[in-house]
Image (cartoon, rainbow, N blue to C red):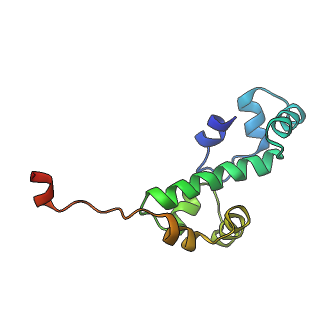
Amino acid sequence: CISIVEKHLDNPEFNISTFSREIGMSHPSLYKKIKAVSGLTVNVFIRYLRLRKASELLINSDKTIVEITYITGFNDVRYFREQFYKLFQMNPSDYIKRYRKVLSHRPAEEEDH
């Protein structure tokens, strides 16, 4: 399930019908399976995986919040921020300030030693 969602992560049109078709289950069967395993509905499960990937990108890349919004399949930055806050109890910019590693290259003279 996770790999199917991750394959379509940047596609805002990815939905339950596509998910059901790719995994080879009916919509009701997929819903029951996801709910039993994760406790989440299919839509919430998809959104959770998108937000989890967004959090990784916020920490491990120098991409902007807007870029990450679209990379993870959200069409609306405001909606992305709202959902991110619901999951992580902080907005994406505060998350970056708290967790992003400094992504810089070492000076050339350090590499020679």
- Please, which residue is most extreme toward the top here? 24
Residue 67 place in picture, x, y as percent:
51, 63
Res 107 → quadrant: bottom left
Point 53% across, 54% down: residue: 56
Residue at left offset 72%, top offset 48%: 46
In depth, the one of 9 and 53 nearer the eye is 53
| Number of marks drawn | 0
Q: Position of residue 21 (x, y in %)?
A: 75, 31
Q: Nearer the viewer, residue 40 or 75?
A: 40
Q: Position of residue 68 (x, y in %)?
A: 53, 61
Residue 54's image quarter?
bottom right
Asked whether, in this view, residue 68 is left or right of residue 81, the answer is left
Residue under the image location 67 percent in, 63 percent down: 88
- Nearest the camera: 40 or 72? 40
Image point (64%, 56%), residue name: 51
From this view, report whether residue 43 is shown above or below residue 21: below
- 73 left or right of 21 in image: left
Percent coordinates x, y for residue 1 in the rendering: 70, 34
Farthest residue in the front direction?
A: 113
15 shown above or below 4: below
Above or below, 91 relative to 51: below
